Amino acid sequence: MKLETSCQSCGMPLDNPDLQGTEKDGSKSDEYCKYCYRNGAFTNPNMTLKEMTSSVITQMEKLNLDPKTIDMAVSALPNLKRWKASAVVF
Ligand SMILES: [Zn+2]
């Protein structure tokens, strides 16, 4: 059964436990992937939404995904938990 969650930072589908990030105590994160979140912290805490957007585009282009799919992924980014909350942080 496929997990309906995607990473709340980059939007990657967390359909494989291997992709889930880790909390400080080593447990799996239900919200973030291992590329964004490790040991209870973001791997790149100073990343902006703009930087994440271009990183997602680059990675998806590497996978030869069609522009429509990339566009959908990018437009979903601002609604993810990490970026929705970012306005409150500073
Ligand atoms: Zn991620």
Image (tube, rainbow, N blue to C red):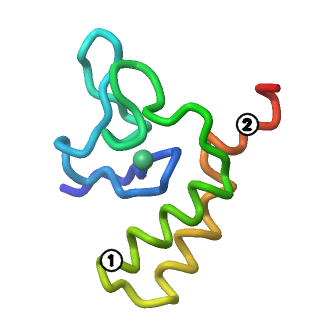
Name the spot of residue 54 as percent of width and height, x first. 57, 66
Say if 26 sits above or below 7 in the image: above
Q: Nearer the viewer, mark 2 or mark 1?
A: 1
Label 2 crowd bin: few (<14), some (14–19), many (20+), radius 10 Å: few
Determine whether label 2 and label 1 are within 8 Å by CB.
no
Residue nearer the viewer, 5 or 37:
37
Check the picture and name the quadrant holding the C terminus.
top right
> Where the N terminus falls, by quadrant?
bottom left
Q: Of the residues shown, which amino acid type is indicated by label 2?
A: Ser
Q: Residue at x 40, y 80 (%)?
A: 61
Residue displayed at 61% across by 55% down: 51
Residue 79, which numbered label? none
Residue 9: x percent and y percent?
A: 52, 46
* Image vertical order of residue 88 relative to residue 53, above or below: above
- Residue bearing the label numbered 2: 86
Looking at the image, is 70 positioned above or below residue 66?
above
Which residue: 50% across, 36% down? 44
58 and 40: which one is in front? Answer: 58
Seen as rendered, the residue at the extreme top is 25
Query: Is 35 placed above or below 50 here?
Result: above
The residue to which callout 1 is attached is 62
Circle 1 Cα neighbour tier, 10 Å, few/some/many (<14 / 14–19 / ≥20): few
> Residue sitting at 47 percent across and 56 percent down?
11
In the rendered image, which quarter is residue 46 located in? Answer: top right
